[in-house]
Image (spheres, rainbow, N blue to C red):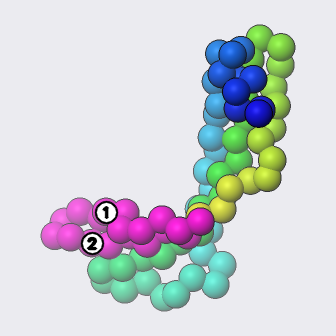
Amino acid sequence: MQWAQWAEQQAKVIADVSIECSGCPEDTDTVVQRVATIKQTAVSGSGTDTVEPDTTVWVTIVREGDRWLIDEIRY
């Protein structure tokens, strides 16, 4: 419901992402796992609204050659 209202208001949603590693498995040469917390704020002509609750995802990143790629995102 709230997202539909923001769409009608042509609100912009700002995402602030913090990357943590509390309790993550040890990094290897080819795999890194992290926890990302996403805080979102909708900004419209009538003000700002904080999206509750924050979104938390677990991310696995793998090395392929000389690049690091997102392999998995779990909610």
Callout 1: SS:
strand
44 left or right of 12? right
Say which quadrant the C terminus sits in. Answer: bottom right
Near-viewer residue (18 or 73): 73
Number of numbered callouts drawn:
2
Residue 51, compared with residue 13, is above or below; it is: below
Indicate the position of residue 37 as horizontal and vertical percent values.
66, 58
Q: Residue at the front extreme?
A: 1
Whole-number angstrom distance, CA of label 2 to CA of label 1? 6 Å
Name the residue type under label 2. Arg
Q: Which residues are magenta?
A: 58-75
Q: On the image, numbered disc 1 is attached to which residue?
A: 69
Q: On the image, numbered disc 2 is attached to which residue?
A: 63
Say which quadrant the N terminus sits in. Answer: top right
36 left or right of 47? left
1 left or right of 30? right
Indicate the position of residue 40 as horizontal and vertical percent values.
70, 41
Indicate the position of residue 46 as horizontal and vertical percent values.
83, 14
* Residue 55 appears in the picture as rendered: yes
**Residue at point 63%, 40% (across, down):** 15
Residue 29, compared with residue 57, is above or below; it is: below
Near-viewer residue (2 or 11): 2
Near-viewer residue (21 or 50): 50
Name the residue type under label 1. Leu
Near mark 2 (Cα within 10 A), the count class, few <14, some 14-19 or many ≥20, is some
**Residue at point 48%, 88% (across, down):** 26
Q: Is residue 73 magenta?
A: yes
